Image: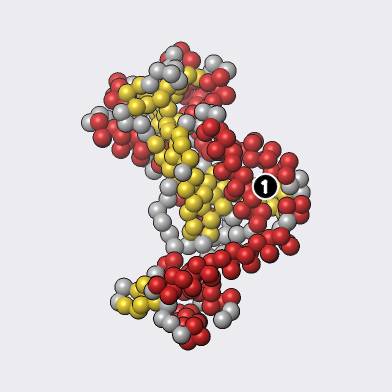
Amino acid sequence: MDVVQLKTLIHVAELGSLSKASDRLHIAQPALSRQIRLLEKELGAYLFDRHGRGMEITDAGREVLAHATRIMEEMESIRSSVVGGKSSFRGTVVIGTTPTVAEIVTVPLVRKIKEEHPNLAIRFSSAFSGYLLDWVQRGELELAISYDPQPLHTLRIVPVMMENLLLVGPASAKLRLDAPVSFESLAEQQLVLPSARHSLRVILDNCAREVGIKLKTSVEADSFGAMIDLVRNGFGLTALPLASIYTQIESGVLSAAPLVDPIPMRKLVQVFPADRRVSPAAKFVGDAFIEIAADLVGREIWAGHML
């Protein structure tokens, strides 16, 4: 029994298929099959049932899987304590976020990183979710903060929170955080929204269909900054997460109100590569992001709830 066999077991059990595990690990399928057979021979038990749909783990396999997972976690812990201990994080972590998330977390995340690991640099990229996922798969990002992507075997997706979208307007709109607005009433408003390829627009259009209305868009803008400028100058209302415009609400530049019946929401997730080792420094950055998000949600600066 060796680490390669245990690693193979974990990936085949997760994916339910030798071919999928082969794609993820970039190891020939016969070689993976041989590792499983050697492990079964040593343990004297079948770990998988083979059938046309793939490989289904047996009860004995589940027991071995639990031990294998713990062993791999302990090995990663040992590696982290030696080469990535808290006082020794160096180099650069490359993280990608959507534009609205960048508005929310860039400053507090960099502040937390510099407080705990002053020698660790961070490089931000901001783009739509589709680009972020592609960059993670190509190895250009170590992690991304994205909105609920379609599952891919090359990606490990970690749910973070459900984010509420609020109606946002200029100060003259006199929207109030304690005065919810029905989604149906948006039929009467001119809106500044991103184009149809943007996840925010998809969510709003789905909510509109649910209540039987059609949204009227005065201007389409795929730039967060452009949307805010247009709203502030009276070209229409928009919908955004509260945290992304919280300081402008507090300063009286913008006003906002919760949308209800239905509440437009979207799932925020962390995305890591599933076929490559994630550095301890990148894991630290991911954990730091979750801590910041939980703090902002708890203080009602980021409307929504943690998952």
Residue 105 lies left or right of residue 34; in this view the side is right
Which residue is at the front of the view, 87 or 1? 1
Q: Helix, strand, or loop for circle 1?
A: strand
Residue positioned 56% across, 43% down in the render: 290
Q: Quadrant of residue 80?
A: bottom right
Residue 29 in sight in this render: yes
Q: Which residue is mark 1?
A: 122
Residue 182, percent across and down?
Answer: 32, 23
Residue 17 in sight in this render: no
Image position of 265 with respect to 269: above or below: above
Which residue is at the front of the view, 141 or 81? 81
Residue 246 lies left or right of residue 166; in this view the side is right
Image position of 240 with respect to 64: above or below: above
The amino acid marked with disc number 1 is Ile
**Display coloring:** secondary structure
Q: Quadrant location of the N terminus?
A: bottom right
Residue positioned 69% across, 52% down in the render: 92
| Mark 1 surroundings: few (<14), some (14-19) or many (≥20) residues within 10 A | some
Image position of 232 with respect to 2: above or below: above
Q: Quadrant of residue 103?
A: top right
Residue positioned 76% across, 54% down in the render: 88
Image position of 300 with respect to 292: above or below: above
Residue positioned 76% across, 49% down in the render: 119
Residue 52, percent across and down?
Answer: 30, 77
Residue 183, percent across and down?
Answer: 32, 26
